[in-house]
């Protein structure tokens, strides 16, 4: 049997090493090499370079023909760390502000547990994904033949959640995380001197009107019983203190769970932009891109998750409130049934994507044991009567 104290200490060391050396999407070269070397040390069959910097490892036991995948994300964010911890980032302007270092360490721990103890009949795929923050890593791996080269019947993923106590797990059937669309609206006119606005076709006033008018999409056009969020996050003009701008770029994102809600948001955004542009005699264009799709859990997989989680924790909630944040794991759930769940990062944890955030090492063993329990739940060994 695995010495859990030794495993826990190993996961902490792995996590701290990864945290010191964060790498953003599709540049996770050191991280991927570290993961691959560690997995080979457990005796797993490892393939690198899947979808750019992704790593896939395979572990087989028994004669079962079913396969379960477990996924962790590896990338960091372009944020300057302000934690002050001893294992703080050594890379200027980059840090693991979302806990992907912890996710990677937990899945490495699960691979170690399962390689040493077994307790399942079939095949496990350990998927270490790049570029989750960009919403491109899962798709890149799939386009590189992930499903054909390393087939699996179902998939499970785990993400830390600040505010949830350590040792607690939660998920839900159906929508659990939202789709994300990104937009950029450009208003173009004629700039001019601030003292003579009548001689120009400036875009500051119509731009400000547009920011406020976009709020009506959620307040007045979308169904109040369906989730919709429209957020303007940037307002960039080419003017200066005594010059009226001739161009303004308005950027932001929109969140929803249903494709028809996403379509409504885009349609209304284009209509509002056209109307305000015509009213002020300027030109308006809208770029609208869908980056993340909604994360939709399979009900049967949630039940399986609940049984597995119940074996390692008494604090399991399968009626969690959906989140309006987005997750690249959704791409895998379009291909096979699965479940995405949350593990507590502590009630006093800083928020995700904050410069003072750090993954809680006390959660590592809980996560590794849950991953292993899911495999044993879904790939049970045959009982000998």
Image (cartoon, helix red, strand yellow):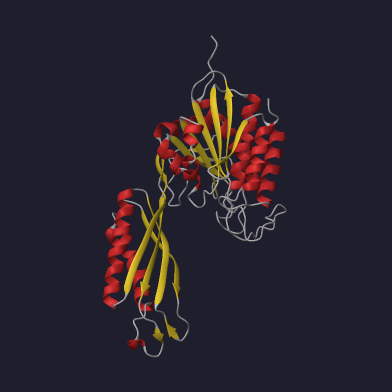
**Which residue lies at the image location 41% right of the left edge and 31% below the top edge?**
300
Residue reaching furthest to the bottom:
195
Q: Quadrant of the N terminus?
A: top right
**Which residue lies at the image location 45% right of the left edge and 50% below the top edge?**
326
Q: In the picture, residue 104 is in which quadrant?
A: top right
**Which residue lies at the image location 49% right of the left edge and 45% below the top edge?**
140
**How far across and down, in percent of the image, does residue 202 sit?**
36, 80
- Work out whether 362 lies above or below 288: above
- Work out whether 185 lies above or below 173: below
**How far across and down, in percent of the image, does residue 314 sit?**
54, 34
285 relative to 32 in the view: left or right? left
**Which residue lies at the image location 40% right of the left edge and 47% below the top edge?**
293
Q: Nearer the viewer, residue 74 or 372?
A: 74
Q: In the picture, residue 343 is in which quadrant?
A: top right
Q: In the picture, residue 190 is in which quadrant?
A: bottom left
**How far across and down, in percent of the image, does residue 303 sit?**
44, 31
Residue 366 visible somewhere in the drawing: no
């Amino acid at each position: 049997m695995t010495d859990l104290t030794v495993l826990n200490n190993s996961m902490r060391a792995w996590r701290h090493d990864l945290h010191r050396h964060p790498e953003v999407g599709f540049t996770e070269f050191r991280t991927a090499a570290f993961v691959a070397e560690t997995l080979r040390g457990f005796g797993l069959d490892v393939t690198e370079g899947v979808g750019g910097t992704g790593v896939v490892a395979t572990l087989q036991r028994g004669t079962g023909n079913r396969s379960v995948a477990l996924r962790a994300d590896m990338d960091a964010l372009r944020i300057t760390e302000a934690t002050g911890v001893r294992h703080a980032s050594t890379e200027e302007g980059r840090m693991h502000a979302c806990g992907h270092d912890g996710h990677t360490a937990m899945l490495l721990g699960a691979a170690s547990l399962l390689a040493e103890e077994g307790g399942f009949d079939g095949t496990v795929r350990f998927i270490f994904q790049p570029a989750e923050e960009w919403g491109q890593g899962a798709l890149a791996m799939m386009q590189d033949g992930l499903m054909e080269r390393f087939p699996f019947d179902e998939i499970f993923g785990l993400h830390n959640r600040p505010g949830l106590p350590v040792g607690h797990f939660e998920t839900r059937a159906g929508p659990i995380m939202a789709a994300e669309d990104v937009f950029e609206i450009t208003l173009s006119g004629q700039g001019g001197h601030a003292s003579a606005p009548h001689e120009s076709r400036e875009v500051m006033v119509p731009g400000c009107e547009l920011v406020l008018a976009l709020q009506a999409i959620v307040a007045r056009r979308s169904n109040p019983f369906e989730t919709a969020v429209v957020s303007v996050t940037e307002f960039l003009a080419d003017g200066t203190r005594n010059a009226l701008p001739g161009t303004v770029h308005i950027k932001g994102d929109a969140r929803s769970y249903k494709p028809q809600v996403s379509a409504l948001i885009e349609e209304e955004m284009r209509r509002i932009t056209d109307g305000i542009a015509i009213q002020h005699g300027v030109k308006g264009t809208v770029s609208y891109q869908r980056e993340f799709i909604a994360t939709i859990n399979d009900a049967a997989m949630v039940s399986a998750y609940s049984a597995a989680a119940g074996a390692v924790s008494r604090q399991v909630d399968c009626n969690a409130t959906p989140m309006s944040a987005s997750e690249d794991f959704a791409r895998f759930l379009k291909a096979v049934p699965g479940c995405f769940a949350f593990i507590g990062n502590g009630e006093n944890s800083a928020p995700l994507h904050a410069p003072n955030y750090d993954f809680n090492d006390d959660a590592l063993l809980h996560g590794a044991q849950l991953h292993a329990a899911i495999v044993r739940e879904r790939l049970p060994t045959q009982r000998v009567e």
